[in-house]
Image: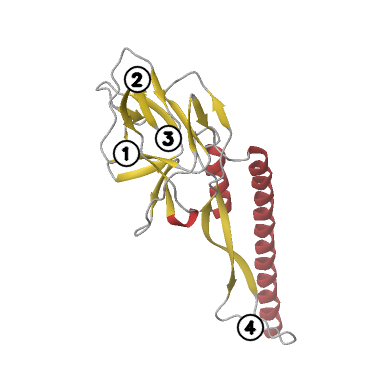
């Protein structure tokens, strides 16, 4: 059921820009009261999903005609100011708000290097360089703050945001900011669909096995009761 929920969420976000697929992390469950095999001495063990991990592999970069669409080629994330604090994302679908602030599509401000936001006046085209510096008519308006983290150092928040764990410090970005491009989800649609079908079949088989076990137990109880009389 955990695998089904995870795969369904991945497939639901195939078209979400910058979305990173979740994967299962399995460990071995050993029952505390499980009896040991008389021949091998081993107790019964079964795989169990200990937790999930996020695949940070880069998705396909798609060309757009919007100069405010940004993507990072390589390692790195954009810093965003949200009501819950600074968050990081690979979704570079930005826009200019009514007040001239550079924001995400959900209205959160894109964070400037050193803090604060970036204001873009109307009336002239914008150029965004490889390090995130925003230029307009030859003048620097600011630099988009970027950062890099190890996979073990960040936690996925919602569909496309990440937050570092307590005590984890950001590293400088090693990737390159590309203007006029968006990073697509890294979910493998065909792979996830095949995996989803396989897990559903496995789920059905386990249900049938449980029903057979229940029927056998019921039959055994009925037979024992009949002998006793």
Q: Residues within 10 Å of mark 3 (few under 14, many from 20)?
A: some
Q: Earlier in the sequence, mark 3 or mark 4?
A: 4
Q: Closer to us: mark 2 or mark 4?
A: 2
Q: Point out the tag, 2 or 1, that comes first from the N-terminus.
A: 1
- Farthest residue to the front: give it: 138
Quarter occupied by the C terminus: bottom right
Q: Nearer the viewer, mark 2 or mark 3?
A: 2
Q: CA distance from mark 2 to mark 1?
A: 19 Å
Disc 2 to disc 4, how far (Cα)? 75 Å
Residue holding disc 2: 138
Residue 113's mark? 1
The circle drawn on residue 35 is 4
Q: Nearer the viewer, mark 3 or mark 4?
A: 3
Residue 191, compared with residue 209, is above or below; it is: above
**Residue 158, image quadrant:** top left
Q: Nearer the viewer, residue 12 or 184?
A: 184
Q: In the image, what residue occupies the spot 50% across and 34% down?
A: 16
The x and y percentages for residue 183 are 52, 33
């Amino acid at each position: 059921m955990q695998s089904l929920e995870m795969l369904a969420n991945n497939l639901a976000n195939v078209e979400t820009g910058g979305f990173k697929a979740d994967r299962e992390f399995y460990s071995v469950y050993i029952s505390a009261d499980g009896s040991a095999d008389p021949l091998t001495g081993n107790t019964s063990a079964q795989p169990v999903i200990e937790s999930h991990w996020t695949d940070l592999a880069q998705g396909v970069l798609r060309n757009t005609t919007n100069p405010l669409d940004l993507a990072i080629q390589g390692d790195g994330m954009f810093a965003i100011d949200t009501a819950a604090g600074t968050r990081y994302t690979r979704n570079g679908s930005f826009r200019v708000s009514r007040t001239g602030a550079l924001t995400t599509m959900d209205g959160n401000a894109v964070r400037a290097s050193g803090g604060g936001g970036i204001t873009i006046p109307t009336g002239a085209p914008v150029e965004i360089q490889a390090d995130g510096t925003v230029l307009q008519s030859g003048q620097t308006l600011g630099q988009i703050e970027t950062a890099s983290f190890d996979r073990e150092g960040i936690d996925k928040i919602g569909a496309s945001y990440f937050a570092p764990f307590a005590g984890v410090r950001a590293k400088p970005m090693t990737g390159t900011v590309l203007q006029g491009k968006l990073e697509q989800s890294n979910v493998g649609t065909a792979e996830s669909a095949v995996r989803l079908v396989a897990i559903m079949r496995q789920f059905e088989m386990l249900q049938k096995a449980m029903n057979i076990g229940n029927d056998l137990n019921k039959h055994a109880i009925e037979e024992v009761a009949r002998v006793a009389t």
